[in-house]
Image (cartoon, rainbow, N blue to C red):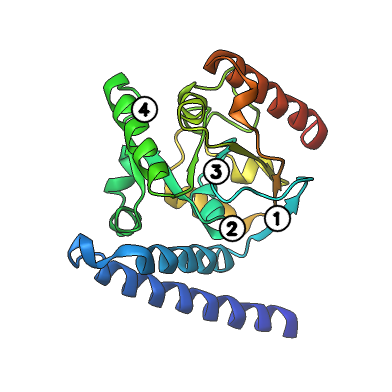
């Protein structure tokens, strides 16, 4: 009885903390864009960590890399869940590429835009081209970018292919790709499937019987070792298939 009372009080405190941070960041998001800057980006990452705690998710970072993480990188990851939208920036100093629909999410959409999130309309070739140009510009400014080469939430197993975008930009800029493999131990609870809404998934996260989430970081991949984006993409996709067999099968 004492344990459940303590846990309830703890969760209430974490949610109050998250709600207060949300209110502050939402209000500040209405200020002119030039006033946001690096401070808002840092506060957004603090909010992501607060949200992770409020969801009672045990987010674990596993450093499988043998070499140091480079100063600049394009982070890629598999995309089985909505959780990585806060899980990735909670752990990594990255500006995310998100689907354009995120921009319209209630409250969080404004916050993500103010934090410098880049957006893409996945079904539009023109939008994907524009997103690639925005990514290159962000990299030129010294930023790290995070994106999901599967092209959206494709389920708890690696999709049949990766899109070329991240690898094409990596080749053109010389910025390495940093692969992160995401493993949700309660896969059915965390996987985002149609017709689930974001509210549905938050409920699933809070009620899962196994809240452990593992993010495995591997060595960055130098684009100089590849001749073209097709070879590069295929190589990295096969790495993810290998990690899937190790951690999910």
Residue 227 horizontal side relative to residue 212, left or right: left
Q: Earlier in the sequence, mark 2 or mark 1?
A: 1
Relative to 69, say whether 153 is above or below: above
Foreground residue among 118 and 174: 174
Residue that label 4 marks: 122
The Cα atoms of the two marked residues, 2 and 4, are separated by: 25 Å
Residue that label 2 marks: 91
Cβ–Cβ below 8 Å for labels 2 and 1? yes
Labels 2, 4: front one: 2
Labels 1, 3: front one: 3
Cβ–Cβ below 8 Å for labels 3 and 4? no
Residue that label 3 marks: 73
Q: Secondary structure at mark 2?
A: helix
Q: Secondary structure at mark 1?
A: strand
Q: Secondary structure at mark 4?
A: loop
Relative to 3, say whether 73 is above or below: above
Foreground residue among 188 and 44: 44
Residue 17's x, y, as percent?
A: 47, 78
Which residue is rendered at x = 79% and y = 28% of the image?
245
The Cα atoms of the two marked residues, 1 and 3, are separated by: 17 Å
Residue that label 1 marks: 61
The Cα atoms of the two marked residues, 3 and 4, are separated by: 22 Å
Q: Earlier in the sequence, mark 3 or mark 4?
A: 3
Which residue is rendered at x = 34% and y = 26% of the image?
128
Q: Earlier in the sequence, mark 1 or mark 3?
A: 1
Foreground residue among 195 and 152: 152
Q: Earlier in the sequence, mark 2 or mark 4?
A: 2
Which residue is rendered at x = 61% and y = 58% of the image?
207
Q: Earlier in the sequence, mark 3 or mark 2?
A: 3
Residue 44 horizontal side relative to residue 107, left or right: right
Does the image show residue 1? no
């Amino acid at each position: 009885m004492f344990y459940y009372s303590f846990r309830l009080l703890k969760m209430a405190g974490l949610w109050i903390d998250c709600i207060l941070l949300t209110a502050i960041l939402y209000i500040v998001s209405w200020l002119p864009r030039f006033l946001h800057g690096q401070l808002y980006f840092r506060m957004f990452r603090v909010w992501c960590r607060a949200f992770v705690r409020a969801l009672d998710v045990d987010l674990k970072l596993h450093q499988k890399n043998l070499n140091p993480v480079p100063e600049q990188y394009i982070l890629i990851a598999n995309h089985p869940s909505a959780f990585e939208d806060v899980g990735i920036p909670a752990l990594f100093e990255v500006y995310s590429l998100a689907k354009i629909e995120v921009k319209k999410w209630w409250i969080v959409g404004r916050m993500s835009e103010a934090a410098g999130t880049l957006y893409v309309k996945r079904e539009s070739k023109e939008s994907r081209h524009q997103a690639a140009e925005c990514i290159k510009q962000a990299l030129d400014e010294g930023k790290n970018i995070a994106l999901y080469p599967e092209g959206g939430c494709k389920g708890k197993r690696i999709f049949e292919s990766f899109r070329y975008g991240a690898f094409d930009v990596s080749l053109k800029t010389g910025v390495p790709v940093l692969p992160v493999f995401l493993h949700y131990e309660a896969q059915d609870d965390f996987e985002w499937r149609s017709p689930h809404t974001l509210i549905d998934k938050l409920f699933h996260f809070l009620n899962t019987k196994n809240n452990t989430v593992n993010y495995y970081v591997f060595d960055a991949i130098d684009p100089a070792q590849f001749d073209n984006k097709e070879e590069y993409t295929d190589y990295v996709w096969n790495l993810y298939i290998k990690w899937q067999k190790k951690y999910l099968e």
